[in-house]
Image (cartoon, rainbow, N blue to C red):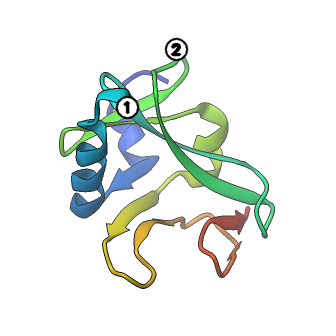
Amino acid sequence: MDTDTSTGSVVTLTSSAAQEVKSLLSQPENSGRSLRVFVEQGGCSGMQYSMVFDERRPDDASVEMDGVSVLVDPFSAKFIRGAVVDFSDALTGGGFKISNPNARQSCGCGKSFEA
């Protein structure tokens, strides 16, 4: 997939998530990278969410939101299309959270799901 608006429907960042990602991207070790959101086998429910700062690959979907470039590989896009990444700095239950409309069932930890 190329960079285009169809990617916008793959993953969306809330403004609080975008602010936190920008803060992390300002660290020297993340310079020039983008946020990659992906899924992989594992977790309590079969598939788990992951995020990492990475370089763009030719087949990635890419979208720019609030000054943050978000990458999603084609395999992951099938499982997380329409997902929303949020961030909370609450002491209890804080951190990044992914709301995925494609998950039939999510684990209590919020980090894995059943497709």
The CA distance from mark 1 to mark 2 is 14 Å
Relative image position of residue 110 (x, y in whole percent): 59, 73
- Secondary structure type for disc 1: strand
Contact (CB < 8 A) between labels 1 and 2? no
Look at the picture and state if 19 lies above or below 27.
Answer: below
| Corner quadrant of residue 104 | bottom right
Q: Give whichever of discs 1 and 2 has the lower sequence position.
A: 1
Look at the picture and state if 55 lies above or below 14.
Answer: above
Relative image position of residue 44 (x, y in whole percent): 78, 69
| Corner quadrant of residue 103 | bottom right
Q: Name the disc covering residue 34, or none.
A: 1
Amino acid bearing label 1: Ser
Crowding near pointer 2: few (<14 within 10 Å), some, many (20+)?
few
Name the residue that disc number 2 marks: 58
Q: Quadrant of the C terminus?
A: bottom right
78 on left or right of 33: right
